[in-house]
Amino acid sequence: MMRLFTAGPSPFGRKVVLALHVTGLQDQVDIIATNTAEPDSENRRLNPLGKIPTLVTDEGPLFDSRVILEAIDRFAGGDRLLPAVGPKRTTVQTRIALIDGIMDAAILIVYEGRMRPEGMQVQSVLDYQRGKIERSLAYLEDQALQYNKGKNPDAVDIGLACLLDYLDFRQVFDWQVAAPSLVSWMTDFATSVSGYKETLPEGIAAAPWRR
Ligand SMILES: N[C@@H](CCC(=O)N[C@@H](CS)C(=O)NCC(=O)O)C(=O)O
């Protein structure tokens, strides 16, 4: 049995849980609710960065989410979450880097509010991260993405769904205004992909595709 250190609200952790659902491997993993702020945690011993997700496998502790999704793809026989080899794989990896980069910016904004004492947040720091989110959403909007992979999303699709829900969950950025075409993308993803509803962060606001 593998063990996954994660937390319900984590968009990076949710990527892994969704990838396990999509590949049918979810029964092979015990999920361990993890508080990243706890100093003496098993997760910190396994992953000195202390970040989640960490997946403990026969091959050792694996992190981060991008690496874990590549491993899950391999455990599931390959060519499920990423194309096997060649330029298509590199293109997908670049798209994953974009989505993860937007998530990092969103998390830094949330941490500015959570970790700095009240009144010590610096607007220019927040704006710098918001700029990344704004430009990246405009870039995605320009691509007029459509979700048409049914039950078999790739690692980019999984990341994008987790990202948009996280932006809503933490109310970091109104992506529906910045990238209106992603509403139908999200609706098609949510209605096609197994595990979408089960993995929603608890307390996320209602939306038509979350019903
Ligand atoms: N690049 C990492 C990012 C993971 C990450 O930032 N996770 C957050 C929770 S969503 C975390 O562990 N934060 C605590 C910390 O940074 O110490 C990944 O893809 O897994």
Image: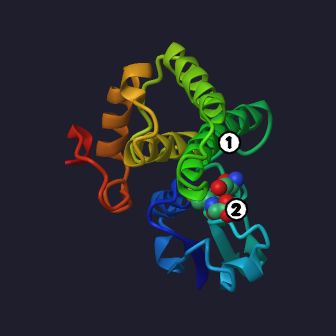
Q: Residues within 10 Å of mark 2 (few under 14, many from 20)?
A: some
SS state under label 1: loop
| Image-quarter location of ligand 1 | bottom right
Q: Distance between the residues labelled 1 and 2?
A: 13 Å
Residue at image point 77% right, 67% down: 49
Question: Position of 210 compared to 10: left or right?
Answer: left
Question: Position of 115 compared to 50: left or right?
Answer: left
**Which image quarter is the N terminus in?**
bottom right
Residue at image point 63% right, 33% down: 129
The percent coordinates of residue 130 (x first, y second) are 57, 30
Residue with the mark numbered 2: 71
Q: Is mark 1 within 8 Å of ligand 1?
A: no
* Residue 65 visible (yes or no): no
Residue with the mark numbered 1: 83
Q: In which quarter of the image is residue 57?
A: bottom right
Residue closer to the observer: 140 or 77: 140
* Residue 211 visible (yes or no): yes
Name the amino acid, label 1: Pro
Residue at image point 45% right, 47% down: 166
Q: Which of marks 1 and 2 is nearer the N terminus?
A: 2
Give the total of numbered labels: 2
Question: Position of 142 compared to 63: left or right?
Answer: left
Residue closer to the observer: 72 or 211: 211
